[in-house]
Amino acid sequence: MPTAPKLFCQSVSCPRCEYANDATFRYCQNCGYKRKILTVGHTQRTDVTLDVSALDNRLSQIASLSANTSYSKQKSSLQKELEFFLASLPFPKDISTVTPRELCRFLVWKDQKGKTKVHYAGCQFYARKGSFPCPCPTRLAFGTVDSLIGKLRTIFNEVGRRGEWDPRLLLGNPATDLSLKQYLKCVTAEQLQAQATPKQATPFFVNDLLQLSHLIDRKLRSEDLTPIDMFVLLRDQAFFKTLFFSGDRPGDLSQVKTPEILRFPDNSGLLFNHVWGKTLRDGSSNLFAIRRNQNADICPVKAIDLYVTFAKGIGIDITSGFLFRPITPDGGIVDRPFSSSAADSRFRVYLDEGNLAQAATLHGFRSGCAITLALAGAGLQDVMGHVGWRHRSTATYYMQLSKVMSTNSPSTTLSGQEVNIADPGVLYQNCNSLKDFIPAFPR
């Protein structure tokens, strides 16, 4: 039986009988086990030439990548706003001394810039969405407030104010205090009681895409277009058609690089292999295909081919790098992603010029694609796999068919027009593996 260790000497247990021996024992006093002494030799030092400047350059490159993300830019902008607010207080403060009380005041100050109308119970426009001539206030949506609090927590973590807020010592992260959580809870309850629920994107359907395509085609026939103008129109045409038939997120589609695209052996469509996006951050991928459409006016494959061919004709090589590229203020074309914000600005221009559905958004392409596929007979799992939804609840939320059961619904559109929407589950028709595919745009 092992005994208690000596109080005046450090002890260790015998690996055989667990008897408490002195820390320097060679033989166990209980069972006679001979202790094995492991001698670790020191590795002989060799002279290594280190390029410290190259190491620092790599660290700077990584820091630059982190700072250029959309989330980092939003967080930086919010921090500047907070610093401006704190400096404008009657008793100015800064990031290092701010308390939860000042953060709540900051959220109230930001709340005045919101666009969500919160109607009072007696208002004639109660429970109606939109902008109405009534004295009811406009607030930040409760989802936006939640996002702001999350960004504030990250800001204070990065400046060294970590941990839960301690109101007695005034230490920790002030954005973790209960008062901010209570503020969010009250704002959420206020808006839900006023029926100010989050607004869902208006679905964008095939007939809407036809109108948009015809508008861009008319602009392409203009005689006073420069090569850059032609490039922009063809890029927009290809982007919007691909966005609809892929059901992809605008920000994810803008990240597509040409080498990620393969062409079906019979040239019937293109295969996209996404490895980076909003929900693709762990090495997983989203594989989807777009097929040639019988209606050439909305065919995404034809639009992409025209866009790439024209770009090559004006000396822009798109066979490597990003597929959809932006224009610089001086009229240059750069190998950078065509951001979703830039795509949305272009989309707004076409909506205004063509008198199209003003409530449409780029995110409506995604829900419109999913609803169209569902009404065309595709199974829910196939739709989820094509669009890139992982959870069934997300799919059912965006595919609310009651919103499209009208004279202009996709079911009516599909019954009156020949729109060939390939089954998204059939990605490998007549193909045994990805080896059968060919590069979409060989160099």
Image (tube, grey):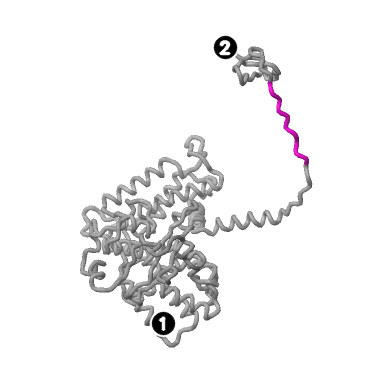
Residue at the spot of label 2: 1
Horizontal relation, residue 381 to residue 329: left or right: left
> Could you tell me which residue is drawn at 73 percent across and 54 percent down?
51
Quadrant in the picture for the C terminus: bottom right
Tell which of 192 and 171 is nearer to you: 192
Q: Amino acid at mark 2?
A: Met
121 vs 171: above or below: below
Element under label 2?
Answer: loop
> Could you tell me which residue is drawn at 63 percent across and 19 percent down?
14
Q: Position of residue 326 (x, y in %)?
A: 50, 71
Q: Which residues lie in the magenta part?
A: 35-44
Is residue 262 among the parts visible in the rendering? Answer: yes
Q: Would you call the spot at circle 1 few (<14 residues within 10 Å), some (14-19), or many (20 or more)?
A: some
Q: Would you call the spot at circle 2 few (<14 residues within 10 Å), some (14-19), or many (20 or more)?
A: few
Residue at the spot of label 1: 220
Horizontal relation, residue 67 to residue 102: left or right: right
Q: Position of residue 344 (x, y in %)?
A: 41, 68
Please check the rendered image and state whether residue 36 is part of the magenta-colored stretch, yes or no.
yes
Tell which of 32 and 26 is nearer to you: 32
